[in-house]
C-alpha cells in the first residue's frame, strides 16, 4: 500500500513546472489527483494520462483561480468526480519580475488575482469539505514572509502578490489549530 492511497488531492496550476511535479509526487504515492490548468489543454491532458497510468484517478480542470465562478465550479466538480478532498495545494501563480514603473496594472491585477485572491478563494471553497477529512491539509507554494527590502526592490508587485499567498498560510494555520482544539477538547 502506498502512503497516500485513497487520499484526494487538488493541485492548482499543475499542467507544467513545479505544479506538474507536485501532482506527480502525490500520484506516485497513491493519491488521486485533481488539478487545474489555465491555458493550454495539451500539457494538461498529457499529465492526466501520465498520472492515470500510475494507477490513480487523475483529472484536469480548466480553471482560473481568480474567478469566483470557476473556483466554485472546480470544487463542486471535484467533489462529484472524486467524492471528497483531503489536501489542497495552492500552486497556481502568475509572475512578472519588473520594477514598479514597468509593471502594467493589467499584469499587477493578474498577479494579485491569481496569487493572493486565488489562494484565498480556492481555500475558502475547500475548507468546508476539508473539515470532514481525516487529516486535512492546505499547502501554499509561497515564500516565508521576509520584509527585507531586497525582496521588494526589483519586483514589488510580484513580491506583494506572493506574500498574499503567504498570509493565507497564517490564516489556514490558525484555522487548523482551532479545529484541532475543537476535536481534542
Image: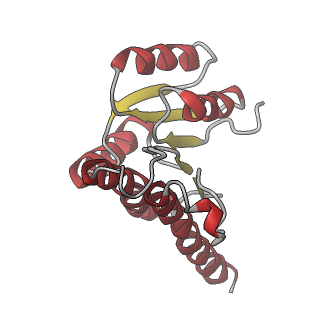
Q: Nearer the viewer, residue 102 or 75?
A: 102
Q: Quadrant of residue 139?
A: bottom right
Expressed as whole percent of the image width and height from the top left, the position of residue 34 reads 47, 35
- Residue at the outermost bottom position: 185
Residue lying at 63% horizontally and 57% vertically, measured from the top left = 143
> In front here: 2 or 38?
38
Place of residue 36 in the rendered image (x, y in percent of width and height, measured from the top left)? 41, 35
Which of the 4 image quarters holds residue 40? top left
Q: Is residue 68 left or right of residue 126?
A: left
Q: Quadrant of the C terminus?
A: bottom right
Q: How is the image coloured?
A: secondary structure
- When the figure is inspected, residue 16 is found, relative to residue 155, above or below; the finding is above
- Looking at the rendered image, the quarter that the N terminus falls into is top right
For the view shown, which residue lies furthest in the left direction?
69
User: Where in the figure is residue 83, as x and y percent of width and height?
Assistant: 44, 42
Most extreme residue toward the front is: 101
- Does residue 127 lie above or below 20 as drawn? below
What residue is drawn where x is 65% and y is 34%? 26
Task: Give the residue at x 53% y 64%.
Answer: 163
Amino acid at each position: 500500500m502506498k502512503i497516500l492511497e485513497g487520499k484526494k488531492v487538488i493541485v492548482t496550476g499543475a499542467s507544467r513546472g513545479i505544479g506538474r511535479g507536485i501532482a506527480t509526487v502525490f500520484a506516485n504515492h497513491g493519491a488521486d489527483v485533481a488539478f487545474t490548468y489555465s491555458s493550454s489543454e495539451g500539457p494538461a491532458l498529457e499529465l492526466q494520462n501520465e498520472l492515470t497510468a500510475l494507477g490513480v484517478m487523475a483529472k484536469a480542470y480548466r480553471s482560473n483561480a481568480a474567478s469566483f465562478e470557476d473556483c466554485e465550479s472546480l470544487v463542486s466538480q471535484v467533489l462529484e468526480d472524486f467524492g471528497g478532498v483531503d489536501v489542497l495545494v495552492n500552486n497556481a501563480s502568475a509572475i512578472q519580475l519588473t520594477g514598479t514603473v514597468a509593471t502594467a496594472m493589467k499584469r499587477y491585477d493578474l498577479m494579485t488575482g491569481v496569487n493572493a485572491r486565488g489562494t484565498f478563494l480556492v481555500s475558502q471553497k475547500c475548507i468546508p469539505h476539508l473539515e470532514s477529512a481525516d487529516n486535512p491539509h492546505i499547502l501554499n507554494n509561497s515564500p516565508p514572509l521576509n520584509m527585507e527590502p531586497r525582496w521588494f526592490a526589483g519586483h514589488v508587485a510580484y513580491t506583494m502578490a506572493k506574500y498574499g499567498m503567504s498570509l493565507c498560510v497564517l490564516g489556514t494555520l490558525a484555522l487548523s489549530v482551532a479545529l484541532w482544539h475543537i476535536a481534542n477538547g
